[in-house]
Amino acid sequence: MQSPLDTRFGPPPGAGYFAHVSVAELAGALRAGRVSSRDLAKAALGEAARWQPVLNAFVTVDETGALEAADQAAREMAAGVDRGPLHGIPVAVKDVIDVRGLPTTSGSRHFAGHIAQEDAECVRHLRAAGAVIVGKTNTHEVANGPTGDRSVSGPTRNPYATDRIAGGSSSGAAAALAAGIVPLALGTDTGGSARIPAACCGVVGLRPTHGTITTAGVVPLAPSLDTVGPMARTAADCRLLWTAMTADHRQTSASARIGWIPPDSVHPTTPAVTRTARDFAGDLLIGEVSVPQLKELRASYRTIQGSEAYALHAERLSTAPELYSEEVRDRLRAGGEVLGWEYARALELRDRARSTVMDLLQAYDFLALPTIPMLAPPLDTRTDRIGGEPVEVNAALLALTSPWSILGLPAVSVPAGLVDGLPTALQLVGPPGSEQHLLTTAERLQSTAP
Amino acid sequence: MQSPLDTRFGPPPGAGYFAHVSVAELAGALRAGRVSSRDLAKAALGEAARWQPVLNAFVTVDETGALEAADQAAREMAAGVDRGPLHGIPVAVKDVIDVRGLPTTSGSRHFAGHIAQEDAECVRHLRAAGAVIVGKTNTHEVANGPTGDRSVSGPTRNPYATDRIAGGSSSGAAAALAAGIVPLALGTDTGGSARIPAACCGVVGLRPTHGTITTAGVVPLAPSLDTVGPMARTAADCRLLWTAMTADHRQTSASARIGWIPPDSVHPTTPAVTRTARDFAGDLLIGEVSVPQLKELRASYRTIQGSEAYALHAERLSTAPELYSEEVRDRLRAGGEVLGWEYARALELRDRARSTVMDLLQAYDFLALPTIPMLAPPLDTRTDRIGGEPVEVNAALLALTSPWSILGLPAVSVPAGLVDGLPTALQLVGPPGSEQHLLTTAERLQSTAP
């Protein structure tokens, strides 16, 4: 029999070991000797193998590296070296982030055969915290798409309904967390690439303040927007990951004054999705707010991301366009047609909108709205319906996340409950540097939800 | 009989009262009762009228406002209120900067009939310091051009040779200072609009660190580059203006380690101009340096400035293109053709180049090079010759100033001596916030030059 909590937050059917245990519990069990880091690595490797034919969450599983790192973690712990709560914990890394000795495919034929010579800086931080990297997770091709169903390695599927997208571009990370393959993962977030798949798969995805976690060693998509996105099954776990990576140990209140942004002012939304997200915010929601520039910011996202992505891909597009999938190539080429003055206007809008939002963030700790306006759509679908109206899936998925990317603000996506057996999500947006407060608040919402 | 000093730094023939006295001397005379602020305002108004048919430096002379402000300054001083060294000193303001109750023409038919409702914020600072605004100085049309010979009010002429340009876009400010009409002036500097006319007219023009003096109330050209540029006849006077406007009272050394950038690596230069500038730096010059990205930065200037200027002018260009002069219209339209990805790449180059230059500014206090690669060319000339090679005048004038605009760094142009009776100039470039040190060093160079 399912409790109400199970109904709202239950893992997908058949979810693996890590879907049923918190990182804090794992850390305790490791230190009590009830489990070894090798056991955890083997559990992750086993789940990865079991789920791979179903979800296609991984591009590379590094059994040798994982077991070596697990044994190393065990030896250190036996010798009295304790690297903190991530010590000996399995982690998956999105396949746009360099892990030394492993391929970085970026989900693209263009990157075939590329073996990383060095760890990305964020990966170095993971290793310094004692985490055990078990492999590289699937990504939408060159991280340029919110659906996760275009990749040289094939689409990633949603653990809640395998005929649906996992969301993207950090598709494999979200699917692997939801399915209990790993307890922690690193994604990236340019316009929503950590938050959108987190919302689709019922896990937590954080977009940090732009620039806080360096993207050195991460394949760039749009540098003024790119971030590394910590992801986990719960806000509590995600906070451990954030803290370990950034050494941001600030204690913050678990309370917050939250202003609700009615999302239909930005994009049509499925009523049950919006209602579930809003209900989840509960008592912390103290008012409704409006950010008049949100619609324009959505358009600016295409302008800025399109220009920057084209600047990075221009040579590849001219020398070997056939190595892109048609959809990603068209998307990149459309970005190449944006004019400089449109880009300049987008930056100007960004500055104006930031000042509006920073004013709101004086009256409210956070702004809230759904992460995505709908349930995860079926694979390969590009037009869906919301309230009877046809919507363009790519644009819809990015509509509520990309404005905060433009503004450089941190935002977290937290599962809000299931609707028709599929996850919904609340997105909280805070001022620069508010990650601890965002995650602490999300943790409280997860622990007090009815 | 002229002393060597007169030869190198002498004012143009017939220069007015303010070409022969420093602001510090004026401040002393005011306080000793040897002169009144009304006397100074009348002197400025008289010189403005005398020179106007020759130079066309002013667009608006505000006799009533100037005399009222002068009398107000006198009453305050009599009552024991001393606003500091600018108290009672005449100042001219470039006609892209709002002065309440006066037209802001921007040198353009598009702005005809526009009367400013409020003072620009930089003008408020001037008034708070007790300065007396005598009028608005001519500007290249919409501040978009380095020659100063396109304006709805007609070209400004160079006091040293009235068949030559005063430089632009702050043409009237530089001409008015050189001719001794006013001791102080406010210009603006986007790609060199304070430094270039200062170099052409043998006065001092400062481009501050981007963002230090707010541009609120100033007609924008390219917001990411626009600055308000304090200008004066000497570095000492300019420093008084800077200090009064910013309340930056830091004491700095008058010594500096200066690295010379051989300018021909960036653009062909007239040998005598370069030699004179280099000699002027004297003993402070301790080495030669190279900034490999300077040529690319020049191109980036067109990309960034062109995009931002088009963004601001797009509506006017479509509704009333005939209100622009042909040259300025063509220039704006060319900016509208820049692509977004080129703009994005220019920003990326800027970041890389800034880090190169900031590294150099660890080893050297300042970098130095000529402000412009040639002597002020004849009016209306668009192709000139440097060392026998044809050069495009607009590009040549901006070649050595615009890279520092892109980098957001402060730079000052200081007269270095006359060649063939025309001014040459040394440009010093420093790290963000180094304006006091730049001006103090320039002051020392002016006082110790042979």
Image (spheres, coloured by chain):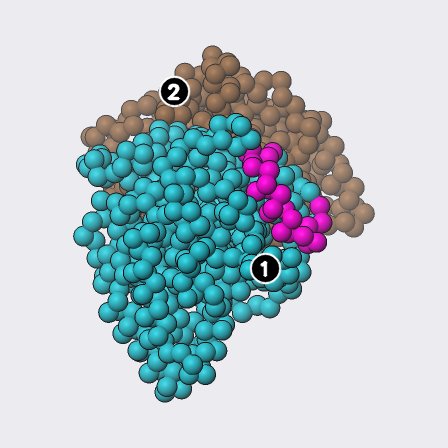
Chain colours: A brown, B cyan
Q: Residue furthest front?
A: B1
Q: Residue furthest top?
A: A322
Label 2 is found on which chain of the structure? A
Q: Residue furthest bottom?
A: B79
Q: Which residue is mark 1?
A: B3
Could you tell me residue A192's position as x and y percent? 42, 37
Q: Which residue is mark 2?
A: A330
Would residue B312 be counted in the magenta stretch? Answer: no
Kindly identify the residue that appears in the image at 37 percent across and 86 percent down.
B78
Residues behind callouts 2 and 1 on a single chain? no
Q: From which residue to which does the magenta span run?
A: B263-287
Could you tell me residue B161's position as x and y percent? 42, 47
**Left or right position of B449 against B327:** right
Label 1 is found on which chain of the structure? B
In the image, B69 versus A119, the foreground residue is: B69
The amino acid sitting under disc 2 is Asp
**Left or right position of B71 against B433:** left
Kindly identify the residue that appears in the image at 40 percent across and 78 percent down.
B35
In the image, B103 versus A312, the foreground residue is: B103
Res. B448 in view = yes
Element under label 1? loop
Q: Quadrant of the N terminus of chain A?
A: top left
Could you tell me residue B139's position as x and y percent? 34, 49
Tell me the tag on residue B128.
none
> What secondary structure is the stretch in magenta mostly built from?
helix
Would residue B267 be counted in the magenta stretch? Answer: yes
Q: Are marks 2 and 1 in contact (CB under 8 Å)?
A: no
